[in-house]
């Protein structure tokens, strides 16, 4: 069971969580619980790091930001004890959860789960702070924003759990962020592949890596709400959204429990920034000089456009990087100014990426055309485009994010029918 930040925000909500956990144990389950920091806490800690040192050392950043989860894991263990349950916390370094050294975006390598399993078998509820790990050189690491989902899936795999229930502040995965589109529809099931793509383009309901890991390890994942009353449908009856394989999805479609759609979801991402390098030499090797230093610094580049060359053998190169990496990317590129040979760096954080996702696209043409037309009809300008087999993304002005998402949701026929209460 994993509980996100909103579910853990304050002692009252932690008590509600403790009750959900206690009930699940009372149904005969052995439970491990993974928790996030209280909502807003990680942002607060990240800001402290920025204030202390704008070009902060990621290893020390991890020491700071991992603390939010330490607090909530201890508080949940205490609350469970107050309800008469046996419970204890296991910090990332205590299990340990081994990760690679990439600070602030570490990847889990393995979890030593023997003691954890033994403790669960003794009837103790294991409370594990999400987001945290331990590097090979014995330093605290964190898994990247939203990483508690991945901790939960990794723990589920390590203890061979029947299911990994991700409790959050919405009751499942919707056709788009229900906070933006009131007519978004809750899905009974979503395939791993679609969820992976949706997460990677900004549907933050699950961290991308958690979906990839669940797919690889065959972990059954359900997304459901922790904001429920005493009479809620038990998690075992699957009231949320299940992440399923394509075969399971086909069965659901055959049984008439799911509809096949070309587009299953729309996501947006405001956390990227655009970088333009002007007057880069238009010759072989030029873009390699730009992206090599970024790759070495583990900065992910997403959309890339190399504009048509000008007469003087020069061209502009536009790409996006995570906003959090923008300052470092800029510094790295400035360092290589002579080698790359550009004129100016122009950056813009006021952009958003809007993506439509669906496995149906593999066999259905026209999804991109519908997107471009719907946006054009509303006067929304597209600054860049990228596609994959099951996704089309466009870059737009950040101020137009909500409008673009709503327009596309309607254009693909995803709006829930107006239902009388
Ligand atoms: P937690 O703190 O529980 O990890 P997050 O804030 O990370 O929660 O993720 C839950 C949020 O994801 C929801 O509140 C919702 O606004 C957002 N979200 C974005 N896209 C979707 C979607 N397609 N379906 C459901 N929620 C979504
Ligand atoms: N607390 C971390 C974050 O806000 C991890 C998580 O909540 O999943 O990114
Ligand atoms: Mg989250």
Image (cartoon, helix red, strand yellow):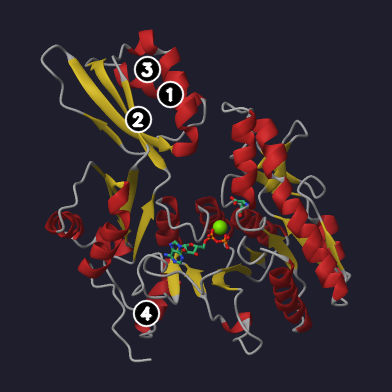
Q: Which residue carries the number 2 mark?
A: 347
Question: Do residues under tags 3 and 2 come within 8 Å of each other at their CB atoms?
Answer: no
Q: CA distance from mark 3 to mark 2?
A: 19 Å
Q: Secondary structure at mark 2?
A: strand
Residue found 78% across the figure and 83% down from its top = 26
The residue at 20%/67% (across/down) is 411
Q: Nearer the viewer, residue 257 or 329?
A: 329
Q: CA distance from mark 2 to mark 4?
A: 43 Å
The answer to whether residue 389 is seen in the rendering is no
Q: How far apart in space, not on screen, are marks 1 and 4 (Cα)?
A: 46 Å
Mark earlier in primary sequence (1, 4)? 4
Looking at the picture, tell me which residue is in the foreground, 20 or 236.
20
The residue that label 3 is drawn on is 289
Q: Mark 3 or 1, which is nearer the eye?
A: 1
Provide the secondary structure element on which disc 3 rests: helix
Q: Position of residue 59 (x, y in %)?
A: 68, 32
Q: Are marks 2 and 1 in contact (CB under 8 Å)?
A: yes
The label on residue 258 is 4
Q: Which mark sits nearer the N-terminus, 2 or 4?
A: 4
Local crowd size for mark 2, using a 10 Å CA cut-off: few (<14), some (14–19), many (≥20):
some
Answer with left or right where residue 385 lies relative to residue 98: left
The front one of 168 and 286 is 168
Q: For the N terminus, which image quadrant?
A: bottom right
First-in-chain label (4 vs 3): 4
Image disc number at residue 330: 1
Mark 2 or mark 4: which is in front? 2
Say which label, 3 or 1, has the lower sequence index: 3
Is label 1 in a helix, a strand or a loop? Answer: helix
Task: Kindly tell me whether mark 4's CB lies below 8 Å from ligand 1.
Answer: no
């Amino acid at each position: 069971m994993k509980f996100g930040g909103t579910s853990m925000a304050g002692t009252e909500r932690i008590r509600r969580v403790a009750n959900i956990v206690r009930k699940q144990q009372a149904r005969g389950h052995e439970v491990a619980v993974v928790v996030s920091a209280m909502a807003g806490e990680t942002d607060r800690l990240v800001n402290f790091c920025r204030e202390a040192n704008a070009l902060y050392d990621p290893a020390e950043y991890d020491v700071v930001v991992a603390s939010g989860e330490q607090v909530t894991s201890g508080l949940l263990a205490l609350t469970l004890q107050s309800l008469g349950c046996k419970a204890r916390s296991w910090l990332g370094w205590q299990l340990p959860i081994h990760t690679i050294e990439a600070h602030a975006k570490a990847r889990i390598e393995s979890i030593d789960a023997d003691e954890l399993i033994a403790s669960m078998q003794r009837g103790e509820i294991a409370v594990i702070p999400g987001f945290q790990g331990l590097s090979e050189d014995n330093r605290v690491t964190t898994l990247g924003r939203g990483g508690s989902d991945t901790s939960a899936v990794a723990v589920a795999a390590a203890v061979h759990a029947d299911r990994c229930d991700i409790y959050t502040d919405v009751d499942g995965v919707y056709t788009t962020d229900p906070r933006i589109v009131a007519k978004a529809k809750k899905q009974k099931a979503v395939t791993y592949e679609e969820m992976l793509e949706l997460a990677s383009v900004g549907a933050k309901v699950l961290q991308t890596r958690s979906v990839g890991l669940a797919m690889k390890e065959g972990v059954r994942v359900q997304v459901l709400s922790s904001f429920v009353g005493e009479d809620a449908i038990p998690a075992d009856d699957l009231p949320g959204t299940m992440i399923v394989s394509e075969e399971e999805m086909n069965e659901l479609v055959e049984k008439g429990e799911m509809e096949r759609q070309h587009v299953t979801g729309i996501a947006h991402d405001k956390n990227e920034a655009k970088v333009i390098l002007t007057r880069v030499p238009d010759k072989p090797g030029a873009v390699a000089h730009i992206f090599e230093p970024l790759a070495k610094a583990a900065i992910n580049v997403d959309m890339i456009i190399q504009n048509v060359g000008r007469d003087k053998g020069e061209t502009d190169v536009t790409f996006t990087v995570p906003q959090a990496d923008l300052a470092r990317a800029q510094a790295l590129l400035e360092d290589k100014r002579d080698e790359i040979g550009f004129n100016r760096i122009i950056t813009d954080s006021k952009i958003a990426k809007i993506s439509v996702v669906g496995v149906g696209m593999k066999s259905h043409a026209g999804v991109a055309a519908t997107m471009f037309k719907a946006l054009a009809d509303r006067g929304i300008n597209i600054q860049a485009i990228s596609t994959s087999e099951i996704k089309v993304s466009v870059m737009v002005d950040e101020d137009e994010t909500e409008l673009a998402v709503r327009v596309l949701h309607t254009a693909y026929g995803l709006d829930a029918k107006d239902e009388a209460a």
